[in-house]
Image (tube, rainbow, N blue to C red):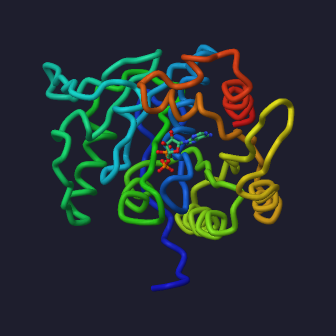
Amino acid sequence: HFGAQVRAPQNLPLPGIKHIVAIASGKGGVGKSTVAANLAIALAQEGARVGLLDADIYGPSQAQMFGTQGEKLRVDEQKRMVPLERYGIKLISIANIVPPGQAMVWRGPILHGTIKQFLQEVAWGDLDYLIIDLPPGTGDVQLSLSQLTRLSGGVIVTTPQDVARIDAERALDMFKRVQVNILGVIENMSYFEQNGHKTHIFGQGGGRQMAEQYKTAFLGEIPIALSVREGGDSGVPVIVGAPQSPEAEAFRQAARNL
Ligand code: ADP
């Protein structure tokens, strides 16, 4: 019932995977997937072995971000899915299984089974980090994940705006209830910078305030930048396409703070 603490999950870590980190947001469109992709690549660039699981079943965007649309996942001799590889990342997305345009009209149990397969029936190999791009909000996928495996922690992505932050606080509360360690808050779309002048389009300081209020780490702020949007749309994330840019550096800094 509402307000209840969900019982401690009797789950196990996945063999060969050191850290499982879930990226969450309260609402859609705040840049959760963009942050997940760039963070994953930043970690790989530092020499870590990284997998990215696109668990945003209803709105998968990682195939677009990594330019793998139209590619189909292979299955190995042991009937495990073999992740696609791009920019040093092992990638699994529902978009590479179900044809584009086909809606995922699934009830909880099917969703649960799919998440279980994505965790247990994928040839992930040895990984330092498995980054999980969650759907927005606090729903079935989040619950399944917390029941199926032991997450090392959750990262909350928000914009500075009140409407985003209020929902982000719910996502943070969800992690608490399912006893997932909160690694911190990343504020996306923090400001737009032009000619050395910063404009705080969605307000200022919201992410940092939220981190302070919930006694968790503030992992960094990512500016609004054309290169970030273009990188996501073109399949070459900004951290690969414009590694010298301030926005790429902001993603690297957030990854270092993890
Ligand atoms: P979510 O996963 O929260 O739904 P996305 O990562 O899909 O959000 O981002 C939503 C849109 O905003 C995408 O078109 C993306 O390219 C764009 N976007 C995200 N972060 C930024 C940013 N820092 N600067 C510019 N555009 C961004």
Q: Is residue 225 left or right of residue 209?
A: left
Instruction: Indicate the quadrant where residue 58 lies.
Output: bottom left
Closer to the camera, 228 or 111? 228
| Residue 161 location (% of width, % of height) | 69, 62
Vertical arrangement, residue 160 with respect to residue 254, above or below: below
| Residue 80 location (% of width, % of height) | 20, 29
Residue at the farthest right position = 196
Closer to the camera, 196 or 239? 196
Q: Residue at 31% x, 22% y: name it.
A: 84
Residue at the farthest front position = 195
| Residue 93 location (% of width, % of height) | 31, 37
**If the image is split into quadrants, where does the C terminus sit?**
top right
Q: Is residue 139 left or right of residue 210?
A: left
| Residue 119 location (% of width, % of height) | 34, 40
Q: Residue at 77% x, 57% y: name it.
A: 211
Instruction: Indicate the quadrant where residue 216 lies.
Output: bottom right
Vertical arrangement, residue 98 with respect to residue 69, above or below: below
**If the image is split into quadrants, where does the N terminus sit?**
bottom left
Vertical arrangement, residue 83 with respect to residue 115, above or below: above
Question: What is the count of numbered marks?
Answer: 0
Q: Residue at 41% x, 25% y: name it.
A: 235
Q: Is residue 20 left or right of residue 66?
A: right
Instruction: Indicate the quadrant where residue 139 lies.
Output: bottom left
Closer to the camera, 54 or 78? 54
Q: Residue at 16% x, 49% y: name it.
A: 102
